[in-house]
Image (cartoon, grey):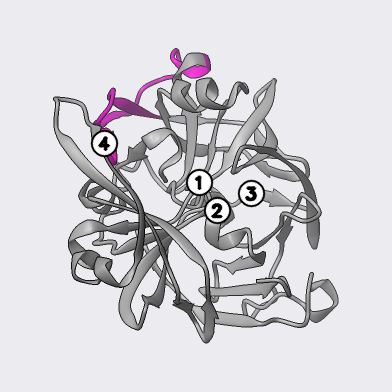
Amino acid sequence: MVVGNVTFKHVIDDPGPDPPPYADFKTLVVPIKRAGNLIIVEATVDSLEGNFVLDTGAPYLVLNETYFRDSPKIDDQDAGGINGSSDRAFSTVVHNFKILDLQYSRLTADVTDLSSIENGRNIKILGLLGTRLFSKFAITVDLSRNVLYIQKLDKDGNIPESERIFTNRLMITPFRYINDVVFLKGSVNDHPLWFAFDSGAETNLLDYGRVKKIIPEMQVISRSKITGIGGTGLEVVYAKFDQLSVGDKVFTNNRVLITNLGKMSKAYGSTVDGILGYDFFVRGIFTINFVKKEFEMYIYTNQ
């Protein structure tokens, strides 16, 4: 997760597994809003209802310290981002969390400062919805209709044919699910790479060290330096390149930020070569089946 340049450790002192949610539906249709390139879903924690960012780069529920600073602490956690470490977060347990008819009686959550997201988008954000909330489901995001579909799966882990959102799938590929992060195998200009799929990332990113040799193959739009906490300088390259391959689909006319993703790899608990964010998934309707570990995409005809 890179919204607001905030990331989290994915391994905590777990107080025990969260119980499965109550889900009396086959397909739950959830309206979504947009804040810049972020996907916003309304949800309720106890009696507090508000906006949450759908963030497949986050491992579980993350709550904004502004509104949940008094929650009971389980364990302190390190929080960081691509430009350095930020304030420490702590873990907590919440009860009575729900997204419409999807209800959780108990959820482990992080509590940390998300003010940079609120200030940057001028919208009140209660938290982030991470992957573990949907680990027993398939989710589909259709930005053209501003709808999130949460779907129950059959005994084989498939979406029932009668419940499929789209049947003319143009791309389907397996993924690795490591530390609650979706990793897709792909390539940039025929150079193989592993990408984290992050719906909270507002652009695509590549690790400078992994792609340094192929930058000359790209069209560099700009170079700049950002200063991280502690005064550390990081070079950021904004570039265009021709071919991004994921599964059996080739995407052209790609834009990407190239920087050091070492902090992100540490947060994910696994080396990451790049991150596929908004610039990637805005090209179509995508489905993540967390049980079968399959990523599907219906790609718009103009892509």
For residue 21, which numbered disc appears in the image? 3
Q: Nearer the viewer, residue 87 or 299?
A: 299
Task: Tell me the crowding category of disc 4: few under 14, some 14 to 19, or many 20 or more residues within 10 angstroms, Cα based.
Answer: many
Nearer the N terminus, badge 2 or badge 4?
4
Nearer the N terminus, badge 3 or badge 4?
3
Taking the image as shown, residue 13 lies to the left or right of residue 282, namely left
Mark 2 and 4 residues: CB-CB less than 8 Å, in contact?
no
Amino acid type shown at disc 1: Glu
- Tell me the distance, in whole angstroms, between the alpha carbons under discs 3 and 4: 36 Å
Above or below: residue 61 compared with residue 112:
below
Q: Position of residue 286 (x, y in %)?
A: 64, 66
Amino acid type shown at disc 2: Tyr
For residue 202, which numbered disc appears in the image? 1
- Tell me the distance, in whole angstroms, between the alpha carbons under discs 2 and 4: 20 Å
How many numbered circles are shown?
4
Foreground: disc 1 or disc 3: 1
Task: Tell me the crowding category of disc 2: few under 14, some 14 to 19, or many 20 or more residues within 10 angstroms, Cα based.
Answer: some
Query: Which residue occupies 42% across, 46% down?
Result: 1
Q: What residue would you read off at disc 4?
A: 83
For residue 278, which numbered disc appears in the image? 2
Mark 3 and 4 residues: CB-CB less than 8 Å, in contact?
no
Query: Which residue occupies 30% across, 80% down?
Result: 191
Farthest residue in the right direction? Answer: 162
Q: Which residues are magenta?
A: 67-91
Task: Tell me the crowding category of disc 1: few under 14, some 14 to 19, or many 20 or more residues within 10 angstroms, Cα based.
Answer: many
Q: In the rendered structure, does residue 167 fall within the stretch colored magenta? A: no
Amino acid type shown at disc 3: Pro
